[in-house]
Protein backbone atom coordinates (compact mmCIF):
# COMPACT_ATOMS: atom_id res chain seq x y z
CA UNK A 1 0.00 0.00 0.00
CA UNK A 2 1.37 3.36 -1.08
CA UNK A 3 0.93 6.50 1.09
CA UNK A 4 0.09 9.84 -0.53
CA UNK A 5 2.38 12.71 0.46
CA UNK A 6 0.86 15.46 -1.69
CA UNK A 7 -2.23 17.64 -1.17
CA UNK A 8 -5.53 16.38 -2.39
CA UNK A 9 -7.96 18.54 -4.29
CA UNK A 10 -10.30 18.60 -1.28
CA UNK A 11 -7.59 19.99 1.01
CA UNK A 12 -6.74 22.72 -1.50
CA UNK A 13 -10.41 23.72 -1.84
CA UNK A 14 -10.86 23.91 1.94
CA UNK A 15 -7.72 26.05 2.25
CA UNK A 16 -8.97 28.41 -0.47
CA UNK A 17 -12.35 28.76 1.26
CA UNK A 18 -10.70 29.64 4.57
CA UNK A 19 -8.42 32.15 2.83
CA UNK A 20 -11.33 33.81 0.99
CA UNK A 21 -13.33 34.17 4.22
CA UNK A 22 -10.32 35.81 5.89
CA UNK A 23 -9.91 38.19 2.94
CA UNK A 24 -13.58 39.16 3.15
CA UNK A 25 -13.03 40.06 6.78
CA UNK A 26 -10.19 42.38 5.79
CA UNK A 27 -12.43 44.01 3.16
CA UNK A 28 -15.10 44.71 5.77
CA UNK A 29 -12.50 46.31 8.04
CA UNK A 30 -11.21 48.45 5.17
CA UNK A 31 -14.72 49.67 4.29
CA UNK A 32 -15.38 50.58 7.93
CA UNK A 33 -12.07 52.47 8.10
CA UNK A 34 -12.93 54.39 4.93
CA UNK A 35 -16.32 55.39 6.33
CA UNK A 36 -14.70 56.61 9.55
CA UNK A 37 -12.09 58.57 7.58
CA UNK A 38 -14.86 60.20 5.54
CA UNK A 39 -16.74 61.21 8.69
CA UNK A 40 -13.59 62.70 10.22
CA UNK A 41 -12.87 64.53 6.97
CA UNK A 42 -16.28 66.22 7.13
CA UNK A 43 -15.66 67.21 10.73
CA UNK A 44 -12.31 68.73 9.81
CA UNK A 45 -13.88 70.71 6.97
CA UNK A 46 -16.60 71.99 9.32
CA UNK A 47 -14.01 73.11 11.89
CA UNK A 48 -12.08 74.92 9.16
CA UNK A 49 -15.27 76.68 8.07
CA UNK A 50 -15.93 77.83 11.65
CA UNK A 51 -12.39 79.18 11.95
CA UNK A 52 -12.71 80.96 8.61
CA UNK A 53 -15.95 82.77 9.50
CA UNK A 54 -14.54 83.64 12.91
CA UNK A 55 -11.54 85.30 11.26
CA UNK A 56 -13.76 87.08 8.72
CA UNK A 57 -16.06 88.40 11.43
CA UNK A 58 -13.07 89.50 13.47
CA UNK A 59 -11.56 91.37 10.53
CA UNK A 60 -14.91 93.03 9.72
CA UNK A 61 -15.34 94.24 13.30
CA UNK A 62 -18.47 96.32 13.75
CA UNK A 63 -18.79 96.93 10.00
CA UNK A 64 -21.54 95.28 8.01
CA UNK A 65 -20.34 91.70 7.42
CA UNK A 66 -23.33 90.33 5.49
CA UNK A 67 -21.23 89.87 2.33
CA UNK A 68 -18.78 87.71 4.26
CA UNK A 69 -21.59 85.68 5.79
CA UNK A 70 -23.30 85.04 2.45
CA UNK A 71 -20.01 83.97 0.89
CA UNK A 72 -19.37 81.65 3.84
CA UNK A 73 -22.84 80.10 3.55
CA UNK A 74 -22.26 79.45 -0.14
CA UNK A 75 -18.92 77.79 0.60
CA UNK A 76 -20.57 75.50 3.14
CA UNK A 77 -22.89 74.15 0.44
CA UNK A 78 -19.89 73.51 -1.81
CA UNK A 79 -17.48 71.83 0.61
CA UNK A 80 -19.87 69.72 2.69
CA UNK A 81 -22.57 67.31 1.48
CA UNK A 82 -25.90 69.14 1.85
CA UNK A 83 -23.98 71.61 4.00
CA UNK A 84 -25.42 74.80 5.35
CA UNK A 85 -24.27 77.38 7.82
CA UNK A 86 -26.10 79.62 10.21
CA UNK A 87 -24.94 82.62 12.21
CA UNK A 88 -26.91 84.16 15.04
CA UNK A 89 -26.19 87.14 17.22
CA UNK A 90 -24.49 90.42 16.54
CA UNK A 91 -21.13 92.02 17.18
CA UNK A 92 -19.29 91.02 19.40
CA UNK A 93 -21.12 87.74 20.27
CA UNK A 94 -22.03 85.22 17.60
CA UNK A 95 -23.40 81.70 17.50
CA UNK A 96 -22.07 79.66 14.57
CA UNK A 97 -23.72 76.44 13.43
CA UNK A 98 -22.84 74.18 10.51
CA UNK A 99 -24.99 71.24 9.43
CA UNK A 100 -24.21 68.60 6.81
CA UNK A 101 -25.42 65.28 5.49
CA UNK A 102 -29.10 66.13 5.85
CA UNK A 103 -29.02 66.70 9.61
CA UNK A 104 -31.42 69.46 10.59
CA UNK A 105 -31.18 72.03 13.36
CA UNK A 106 -33.78 70.23 15.48
CA UNK A 107 -31.77 67.01 15.36
CA UNK A 108 -28.58 68.70 16.53
CA UNK A 109 -28.65 69.45 20.23
CA UNK A 110 -24.88 69.20 20.57
CA UNK A 111 -21.95 69.01 18.17
CA UNK A 112 -21.90 65.70 16.32
CA UNK A 113 -19.19 64.63 13.89
CA UNK A 114 -19.96 61.95 11.33
CA UNK A 115 -21.18 61.43 7.79
CA UNK A 116 -24.20 63.38 9.03
CA UNK A 117 -23.32 65.95 11.60
CA UNK A 118 -23.33 69.42 13.01
CA UNK A 119 -20.93 71.73 14.71
CA UNK A 120 -22.00 74.53 17.03
CA UNK A 121 -19.74 77.19 18.50
CA UNK A 122 -20.19 80.46 20.32
CA UNK A 123 -17.58 83.11 19.80
CA UNK A 124 -16.88 86.44 21.41
CA UNK A 125 -14.73 88.80 19.39
Image (cartoon, grey):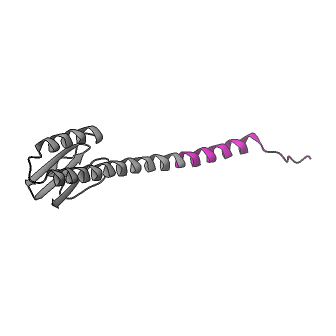
Queried whether the magenta region covers residue 86, the answer comes back as: no
Q: Is residue 118 visible?
A: no
For the record, the magenta segment spans 1-25
Q: Nearer the viewer, residue 64 or 17?
A: 64
In the rendered image, residue 70, in percent from the top left (x then y), is placed at 15, 40
| Apparent side of residue 114 relative to residue 107 in the rendered image (left or right) | right
Q: Measuring 10% from the left and 52% from the top, which residue is drawn there? A: 88
| Apparent side of residue 4 relative to residue 112 in the rendered image (left or right) | right
- In the displayed orientation, state which residue is furthest to the right: 1
In the rendered image, residue 102, in percent from the top left (x then y), is placed at 23, 42
| Picture quadrant where residue 83 is located | top left
Q: Measuring 8% from the left and 53% from the top, which residue is drawn there? A: 62
Queried whether the magenta region covers residue 15, the answer comes back as: yes
In the rendered image, residue 84, in percent from the top left (x then y), is placed at 20, 43
Q: Measuring 19% from the left and 42% from the top, which residue is drawn there? A: 73
Provide the major secondary structure of the magenta segment.
helix
In the rendered image, residue 21, in percent from the top left (x then y), is placed at 57, 46
Amino acid sequence: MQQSTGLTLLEVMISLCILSIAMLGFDVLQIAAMRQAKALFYGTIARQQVKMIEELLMSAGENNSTDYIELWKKQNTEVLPRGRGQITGAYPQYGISIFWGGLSEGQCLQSTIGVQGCLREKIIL
